[in-house]
Amino acid sequence: MAAQLEKRSRAHERAVAKLSVIQEQATRAANQAASDRANLEQTAQRDVSRAQEQIRAHAQTIGALVAEKTELQTRVQHLERLSQQRAQ
């Protein structure tokens, strides 16, 4: 009976040690996952900021091009009117 108790005690100690190792692995995995998530969020935020800046730059360029187009259209219309007046 004492031998059986000793055998079960050793089995219990091995199970406790194995559980401890698994808990450490789980903690490390959770910490790594949290670190990976933080890195991904930081990278995503940086990418979003860059994209927003590019959009702002493109919007400004489009605005300038639209203004230039409007100005050129006005000049063309004016020149067409002058040409028509001279032709008469």
Image (cartoon, rainbow, N blue to C red):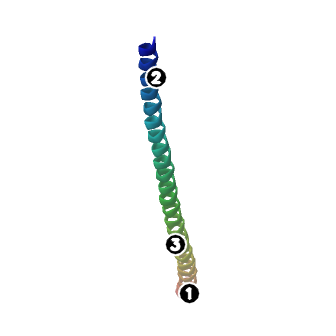
1 or 3: tag closer to the N-terminus: 3
Q: Nearer the viewer, residue 9 or 54?
A: 9
Q: Which residue is mark 3?
A: 57
Image point (58%, 86%), residue name: 85
- Asked if labels 3 and 2 touch by Cβ distance under 8 angstroms, the answer is no
Q: Quadrant of the rendered structure where residue 74 is? A: bottom right
Q: Quadrant of the rendered structure where residue 15 is? A: top left
Circle 2: residue type: Ser
**Residue 29, relative to residue 17: is it above or below?**
below
Residue found at the very far bottom of the displayed protein: 86
Q: Which residue is mark 1?
A: 82
Image point (42%, 24%), residue name: 10
- Asked if labels 1 and 2 touch by Cβ distance under 8 angstroms, the answer is no
Q: Which residue is mark 2?
A: 9
**Residue 52, relative to residue 77: is it above or below?**
above
Q: How many marks?
A: 3
Residue found at the very far front of the displayed protein: 2
Circle 1: residue type: Leu
Q: Residues within 10 Å of mark 3 (few under 14, many from 20)?
A: few
Q: Residues within 10 Å of mark 2 (few under 14, many from 20)?
A: few
Q: How far separated are the C-alphas under marks 1 and 3?
A: 37 Å
Residue 66 image offset from top left, x and y in percent: 55, 73
Q: Nearer the viewer, residue 26 or 5?
A: 5
Camera-side mark, 2 or 3: 2
Residue found at the very far top of the displayed protein: 1
Circle 3: residue type: Ala
